[in-house]
Image (cartoon, grey):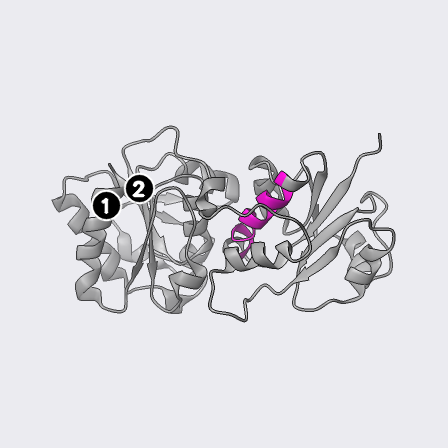
Amino acid sequence: MAKKFFLVGHYGALGDFILTWPALFCLKKLFPTYNFIGIGHQPFLQLAIQQGIFNKGYDMDSANMVNFFTGKFLPKDIPPPDGAALWQINKNQVVELLEIGATLPVVAINPYPPVDVHVAKYYCEELSLHFNLDIPENLANFYPSQKNCSDYVLIHPGSGSLAKNQQPYFYLKLAGRLRSMGITNIRYIMGPVEKELNIDDFFLGEAIEYSNDLNSLVSILQPARLYIGNDSGVSHLAAALGTPTIALYKTTDPKIWGVIGKKVMHIKTDNIKNVFAAINRSINKLLV
């Protein structure tokens, strides 16, 4: 019996990609015998393969993808898919290319919902217009629970947008609050962006974990007793891995962009006076 293939295209940032996972899990449940092929950023594809979402991935930036994105033809090593879901605003020549010979719908999904609904739920609902999906009430049911926990707490003071971040003193004060609660093993996690902006200079004397790639990031996030960070791809990843997560929202709305996981709390930081009290309450619930 010939193998069946379902193609997924996502070309955005890490957090945006992780928010597609519930929809992809729904598709995989509907088509358990299909091989799922991803096209996107290579590190994200490897992550999705490790999480059991894709069977194989193709780097969107490789030279042999040019003819695909211009709608001419698929690269020779990508089999013609039976169906596809592409995160892009409009139907275009790529959709038309994939529709040739497809036995299932080829769907273009707007990455940015035009309605006031959580994006992960919106993606599921958009796909359900074309596929008979079984969408759980709680999308976190797709995500794992933490298996092994270390004793350290991670604070991530960065994100992909400076507008989402607080001033460095906020995170230092946060560490002080955690220490007053008896949590002493506190580490700041920094990536290439934080290092390039010299954000780590504000945290001299503190324990810092540097992560330069997704594999090292996963190895740091997964065992953490607790993770606290801004609305960022790192926060989405921490929650998706099962790490208890407190996500802080300054300029974005958690009702639309909130991280998803088994143990997650969202806190708006528009009123700093109330933030630490909310964090205290969240920690007590997450660390039970």
Where is residue 285 shown, x and y percent of the image?
24, 43
Q: Is 22 in the magenta?
A: yes
Q: Residues within 10 Å of mark 1 (few under 14, many from 20)?
A: some
Q: Nearer the viewer, mark 2 or mark 1?
A: 1
Q: Residues within 10 Å of mark 2 (few under 14, many from 20)?
A: many
Indicate the quadrant containing the C terminus: top left, top right, bottom left or bottom right: top left
Where is residue 157 shown, x and y percent of the image?
33, 56
Image: magenta residue range: 16-29
Name the residue furthest left.
Answer: 180
Relative placement, left or right, of 110 versus 138 is right
Residue 6 visible in the snapshot = yes
Q: Which residue is mark 2?
A: 226
Where is residue 65 shown, x and y percent of the image?
78, 54
Q: Which residue is mark 1?
A: 283
* Label 2 vs 1, first from the N-terminus: 2
Q: Residue at x 33, y 31 (%)?
A: 149
The kind of residue tagged 2 is Leu
Relative placement, left or right, of 91 versus 198 is right
Give the label on residue 98, or none: none
The foreground one among 19 and 82 is 82
Quarter location, residue 243: top left
The foreground one among 9 and 124 is 124
Where is residue 79 shown, x and y percent of the image?
82, 43
Residue 175 visible in the snapshot = no
- How far apart are the alpha carbons under marks 2 and 1? 8 Å
